[in-house]
Amino acid sequence: MTTRIPVTIEGNLTADPEHGASEAGNEYARFTVAINDRRLNETTGRWEDAGTVFHRVVVFNQQSRHVAESLRKGDSVLVAGDLRFGTYVDKESGQTRETRDVVADNVGASLKFASVAVDRAPKARNPEADASGPVVTPVSNTGVGIAR
């Protein structure tokens, strides 16, 4: 049984996201988020850096394309997903190593220190997705009265 640990993290990208596809054709984007811990030094009354924690994040499918197209090194992001643990054998040393990754359900740019322009993509993938929809003229411009 897999342990599911939901997490939400906020931090900065340490590099541009890496975008690719698996052998099975599933798209992914990988990136690392640095979370800087700051604490108030009660003696001096000043904020000080108290260490940095790095989290590896992976996101899949259409969202991976959006992440790769939209985010860059240094961008502040919010990531919600599941913390997953795994193991692998190091090819050089032969030792078993542990991994910790966040498999993201949702990735977004943080609006804490920046503004973002949203470019909405249509949900449908057919000619109707680009249709403008019905055109209506307001009743006040048609000369037709409203009967009550």
Image (cartoon, grey):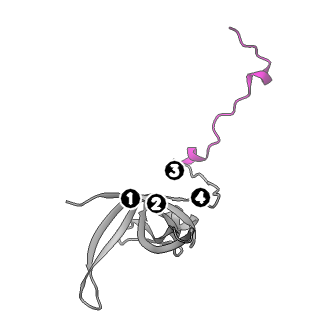
Amino acid under label 2? Answer: Val
Q: Residue at x 51, y 50 (%)?
A: 125
**Which tag, 2 or 1, sits closer to the chain's start?**
1
Q: Is residue 128 above or below residue 92?
A: above
Q: Residue at x 56, y 49 (%)?
A: 122
The secondary element bearing badge 1 is classed as strand
**Which tag, 1 or 4, sits closer to the chain's start?**
1
Q: Which mark is residue 79?
A: 2
Callout in the foreground (4, 2): 4
Amino acid under label 3? Answer: Arg
Amino acid under label 4? Answer: Lys
Task: Please report the bounds of the magenta region as a residue range.
Answer: 126-148
**Which tag, 3 or 1, sits closer to the chain's start?**
1
Residue 8's x, y, as percent? 42, 58
Callout in the foreground (3, 4): 4
The secondary element bearing badge 2 is classed as strand
Q: How many marks?
A: 4
Callouts 2 and 1 close, C-beta under 8 Å: yes
Foreground pick, 132 / 84: 84
Q: Which residue is mark 3?
A: 125
State the CA–CA distance, disc 2 to disc 1: 8 Å
Amino acid under label 1? Answer: Val
State the CA–CA distance, disc 3 to disc 4: 33 Å
Q: Which mark is residue 112?
A: 4
Q: Which residue is mark 1?
A: 7
**Which tag, 4 or 2, sits closer to the chain's start?**
2
- Extreme front residue here? 43
Callouts 4 and 2 close, C-beta under 8 Å: no
